[in-house]
Image (cartoon, rainbow, N blue to C red):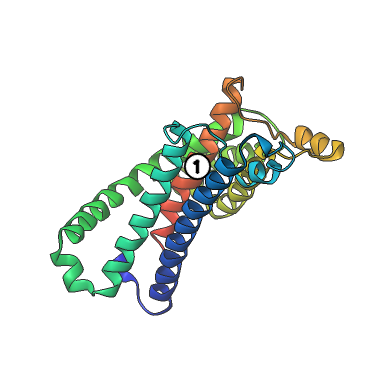
Amino acid sequence: MFCHLTGSQFQRQSWFSWFVVNFSLLAILSHAIFHVVLAIEGDQWSIEDAQWAKIIGFMRVHSWRSLSVIYFLVIQVLAASVALIEIYGSRFGLDSWRDSCLGHLYSSVVRIGSHLRVLCCLLLPAIQLVTGISHPSWVSFPFFICSSIGLVDWSLTSNFLGLFRWWRHLLLYSGLNIILLYVYQLPIEFSEIFLWVAEFIGLFKISAKSEWSEVCSGLSLLLFYVMVSIVLLAHL
């Protein structure tokens, strides 16, 4: 929380906020330059020339009214705005931050966050189990094992805290899992060995034709990572 940021924590928070602002502005500017070049080149820009843009994530559209472009701009502007608000609060001091409307809004969010952490602690064991069994694979197997060990510990000792024992380790593992799953979605031609390994361990492509088990596994994995982060960051 903002009130408890001191010393090195304060500096890291300020550095991260500036990084978000600069990255968001750079993403918006580079996307605008891409569309300007696309409008100038027109049909002369071949698919091979635009392959690098597709890999980076630039969206090739025919009109700025496209929803994909609007979503991109809204997300980047919101990210930059939130980071600037954080910098504003730290730059002008705690008193002015508390007295401002933004300060009252921040205090309300903090109070909601405390209740949200309690809710996360109650729901996380179920989310962890869903992550382990929704799409059985070698990647999700550690979640199932940790859930089973926690349930056995709970049944033998009647200690509910046994379900929380592996959360710090699973936080790192789920983060790595999300990175691998994300990389697998990139429009890159992977080698046959990589594809075989990805299929063997349980990675999958997410699309409109994805099975419900794959969608449930991906969503539960993201939800688990976010909820564990909320719980553990409160104790740092």
In the rendered image, is residue 58 in sight?
no
- Quarter of the image where the C terminus is located: bottom left
Horizontal and vertical percent position of residue 45:
67, 39
- Quarter of the image where the N terminus is located: bottom left
Horizontal and vertical percent position of residue 234:
38, 59
Q: Which residue lies furthest to the bottom in this view?
A: 7
On screen, residue 135 versus residue 161, left or right, reads right
Q: Name the residue under label 1.
A: 224
Q: Return the residue nearer the eye: 10 or 151.
A: 10
On screen, residue 163 versus residue 88, left or right, reads right
Q: Quadrant of residue 106?
A: bottom left
Residue at image point 23% right, 75% down: 93
Q: Return the residue nearer the eye: 49 or 28.
A: 49
Horizontal and vertical percent position of residue 191:
84, 39
In the rendered image, is residue 112 in sight?
yes
Q: Which residue lies furthest to the left in this view?
A: 99
On screen, residue 27 versus residue 119, left or right, reads right
Residue at image point 41% right, 32% down: 65
Is residue 135 positioned above or below 13 on the image?
above
Horizontal and vertical percent position of residue 227:
44, 46
Q: What residue type is labelled 1?
A: Phe
Residue at image point 27% right, 68% down: 89
Is residue 166 positioned above or below 192 on the image?
below
Q: Return the residue nearer the eye: 171 or 178.
A: 178
Secondary structure at numbered mark 1: helix
Assess disc 1: are there few (<14), some (14-19) or many (≥20) residues with their C-alpha within 10 Å of its C-alpha. many
Q: How many labels does the image show?
A: 1
